[in-house]
Each structure stands twice: as C-alpha cells, then as structure tokens.
Amino acid sequence: MNETFFSDNVLLRSRTAAELYRGVRDLPIVDYHSHLNEREIAEGRTFSTITELWLGSDHYKWRAMRACGIEERRITGDAGDYEKFLAYASVMPMLCGNPLYYWTHMELKALFGIRLPLNAQTAPEIYARANEALGQLSVRRLLEKFRVEYIATTDDPASPLSHHGQYGGVRVCPTFRADRALRADGDCLEALGAACGKRIETLADLRDALEQRLRFFLSKGCALADVSVEETPLVGVTEAEAEALFSRRGELEGLAARRLFSYGLAFLAELCRKYGIVLQMHIGALRNVNRPAYLALGADAGYDVMHGSVDTDGIAAFLGRLHAEGKLPKAILYTLEPGSLPALCTVAGSFPDVRVGAAWWFNDTLQGIRRHLETVSEYSVLGTSTGMLTDSRSFAGYCRFDFFRRILADAVAEKVDAGEYDRGGAAQLLYDICYANPKKFMKI
C-alpha cells in the first residue's frame, strides 16, 4: 500500500499548514445547519451495514453513482446492501478530485481505521471490516467520535419537536424552516393549523400561527430560521395584496406566487428580528429538474441543480427594504451559484450582522472551498466567517469539518509562508472561524 495515501497530512502542503491544522483539528463541532434525523439521535440508532450508513439517504453518493452509469436498482432500489456497496465501490476510482473521494476515505480512516483505497477489489474486505466495527457505533457514539457539540436540524413549523434536547455531550436543537408555509402549500397549512389548534383561513391566521410555532421552537432551543430562496424576493408587496393572493392559494403561479412568497419572507425576517434569531437564506437552487425521477423518488434525491445566475441586485433591494423598516435580522446568505459570490459578499457587507455562509452544496469541494475562502477574504472579511456546516442527512458527514479545517489551514498557511499574513494571528483566526464565530453569531 502507498504509505502516502490519505496520510495524516493529506491536503496540508506545508509544515505551517500542518501546525495550524493541529490547533483546530480537535475542536468541538458546531453544526448549525443539517438535515439529520433527530429521532435517530434520541433513540441511538445503529446500522447493520455500512450501506445503511453511507447510502441510505446521501444524494451526493446517489448522484455520483448515476453519473457513472449505475442503474437505479443498485442505488435507491431493491438491490441488497452488499450489492449496493459494491456498486458504490466500483465507481470510486472514477472520482479523482471529487469531494466524495476525499470524504469516503476520510470516513473509512476516522470511523473504522481503514486506510485502503476503496475500489472493486478492496470492497469485500472493507465491507466486512466496516460492518464489524459498526456493531460498536451507534449514532450517539458516532457523534462522540466526531466531537459534535451542537446540531441544528431542519424542521417544519408544524413539527412536534419531540426528540430535541441534550444527548450526552451534544445538544440537538430545531431550525424553523418555513418554506412551504410561506408558499401557502395546502398540506402544510393544514398541518400547521392542527399544530396550533385552529384552521388557517386568512393571511392573519398564517402570521399568528407562524409566530405561535416560532415561540414553541424557541422553547426547544431554536437559534435559527432557514428558507430556500429559489426566486429573488420582491419588495413592496402590501398586506392587502398579499391577503388577496392568499385567498387564491392553490391556484397561484409565476409572478403571483412569487409575490406571496416575498411577503411571507419579509414577515419571517421580521419575526427573526423580533425574537433575536438568525435567518439563513439559501439562494440559487433549481429544484427537481428531472420530473420523472422526482415523481418516482420524491424531493432531495439528487436532481437539484444550480441556477444559471442569481439576482444579487434583487437580494440587495430586499435586504435594504427590511433594513430601512427596522426589520432586518441577523442573516447568513448562501449562494449555490459561485459566480454570484463576489457580489453577494458586497451585499452582505452593506448591512449590519449579515454574513456570507459556507461554500454550499455543489461548492463544498477542494477547490470550491479554496475559491470561497479567497473570495470572502477579498470581498468581505474572512475573520468574521461562521465556518463550516454539514447540510447533510448522513451521520458520517462530519468528516466534512475535517476536510474544511485542512483546506482552511492550508490556505492561510500559504499566505503566512509567503510573508503575506502574520503567523502570530493565524492560530486565532482559525480558532474563530472553526469554533468561536458560529457560537457567538448564533448565540449558541
């Protein structure tokens, strides 16, 4: 075996990088945006096979397997766990440079002590060794191994939040994710009304219900709200117009639907400001582009893509209107379309307590993160960054924090070694980005 394969210094290209990395390697993880299942944490779920852990809900892996020609039966279909694992292993040699190649081998090493490259030949041995080790690794043990301190899950306003709380050393708190309610989705409004004990028939009913449920979320430790912004929100939608649009819910399309959502997003921002929580805006995702696949598999199955462009002018106008009205909360802006990041950095810098979030989704690659860090440092302020998050449905996904910390250490070390940045400030910079900043900004 090649002794340099995923060595302890992988991604660290200098002695300075290795030294900086060691200073943040073992810091606790604050994961303020995830899609993990809190019930599985509460109940201490275990996994029978590595396939359950890796392929049960990870659309990153599903997407890569499809791109390599694996048929759906061996991805999300009725094939057995071993067959699915062999299929994933078979595509691994094709993924040179893909973040999955890094994450997969970092997970094998961190969780199972396995340093073999995964491929069709090594798959049987790795499958057996990983499955044997999984007998000792409940979800809570996994979180302990990764030193996870805080997890924010993503929850519909109607959720009963029955499984949030403190589990050993990790605190699990909800995030108020109100997309469907803001779009007046019928099933969502029915569930929201049931949670509040009343029918939602008017726009005022919806506003009251959302505020009631947010107060409940706050009682469970909620520190953040979250919304997917798939079309730029519009300014100037009046309450009277929104009420009229709400009365036609279920039949709205195009501009009318966008205007109702814009009013709802402004109201959500006002609630966040009122209750002192952070609003996360995820901008630029184009959802479910493969219609037959969506109908067969549902949402979040690997068929979302980047928008071709993001209207940062519109985002600036929306935030500007909120700020002028005294309704702008603390906010984190994420863009899926990387070309809009410089402009979004300048937008964030124009308002108090607005940050640019982590390299999101398709951008959390080796070069994507490096470009993101460089752009934030040039157009915004790297030292105020709130660091990394998983945005994941996989409990193995916490290797992404190690991936990020290595890339960050290497990027800063490059400037230190070039005489472009003070070595004395580098360790504090990394500590703040990796741990102190998210806790302070989110008041965790």
Image: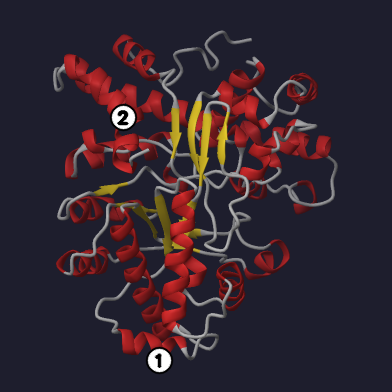
> Which residue is painted at 58% across and 21% down in the image?
145
Q: How many C-alpha atoms fall within 10 Å of the one at disc 2: few (<14), some, or many (≥20)?
A: some
Q: Nearer the viewer, residue 227 or 426?
A: 227
Q: Which residue is mark 1?
A: 244
Q: Secondary structure at mark 2?
A: helix
Residue 310 locus on image (x, y percent): 33, 63
Q: Amino acid at mark 2?
A: Ala
Q: CA distance from mark 2 to mark 1?
A: 45 Å
Task: Say above or below: 104 vs 267.
Answer: above
Residue 111 versus residue 33 in the image, above or below: above
In x, y percent, where is residue 230?
42, 66
In the rendered image, the quadrant that contains the N terminus is top right
The image quadrant where one finds the C terminus is top left
Residue type, label 1: Ala
Which of these two is toward me, 432 or 275? 275
Q: Say whether disc 2 or disc 1 marks the residue closer to the N-terminus.
A: 1
Q: Position of residue 200 (x, y in %)?
A: 53, 80
* 78 on left or right of 111: right
Q: Which mark is residue 176?
A: none
Q: Position of residue 220 (x, y in %)?
A: 50, 48
* Residue identifier under label 2: 436
Name the quadrant containing residue 378: top left
